[in-house]
Image (cartoon, helix red, strand yellow):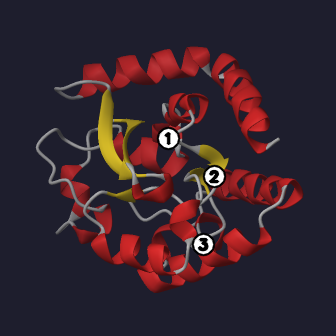
Amino acid sequence: MKRFFDVILAIVVSMVFALPILVIALLVRLTSPGPALYWSDRVGRDNRIFRMPKFRSMRIDTPAVATHLLDRPDQWLTPIGSFLRKSSLDELPQLWSIVKGDMSFVGPRPALFNQADLIALRTENDVHRLVPGLTGWAQVNGRDDLPTPKKVVLDTEYLHRQSFFFDLKVLWLTFLKVITRDGVQH
């Protein structure tokens, strides 16, 4: 049921946002050198690595680490990068990952391949068994503000509470967070 819902919703959202996706891709290309998409190696279900696309919001020479680990992250943003991140529009290409089956709409956010502490804690708590999500319980409860152990506590809570209606609640709360830009630091 969840997979069917993911695919149908991803196709519908892709159709609704087709024009904005094209405009954003063009704006990324026109405002900074490099490709419109950034493909990031992420940790998926059962700790398998997959390639996750995002609209590029950072310069092409940015180190491949979590944004909060960068010294002065704002210096790495492209001219429209801050807007893309705060509006979460940089996440739209992940609809492809949902259709492909690497991601779901709701689940723990996929860790970067080099976030060993997060990967280890998730594995300890069986969170690694979940398909990662475009949004998740941790994102609606703090997003960028949460330390890694707290994210894993929330991811573990999602593991035990997951259901169709809980996913709908997380999607609704995500919508509210995106509209208010709550919890975004860069």
Above or below, 107 against 60 in this view is below
Give the residue displayed 30% in from the left and 46% down from the top. Answer: 41
Q: Earlier in the sequence, mark 1 or mark 2?
A: 1
Q: Amino acid at mark 1?
A: Glu
Q: Quadrant of residue 2?
A: top right
Q: Residues within 10 Å of mark 2 (few under 14, many from 20)?
A: some
Examine the rendering and report whether any part of residue 147 can be seen: no
Q: Are marks 3 and 1 in contact (CB under 8 Å)?
A: no
Give the residue displayed 46% in from the left and 73% down from the top. Answer: 123
Examine the rendering and report whether any part of residue 98 can be seen: yes
Q: Nearer the viewer, residue 74 or 65?
A: 65
Q: Nearer the viewer, residue 7 or 37?
A: 7
Q: Secondary structure at mark 3?
A: helix
Q: Residues within 10 Å of mark 3 (few under 14, many from 20)?
A: many
The quarter of the rendered structure image containing the C terminus is bottom left
Q: Where does label 1 land, which residue?
A: 91
The quarter of the rendered structure image containing the N terminus is top right
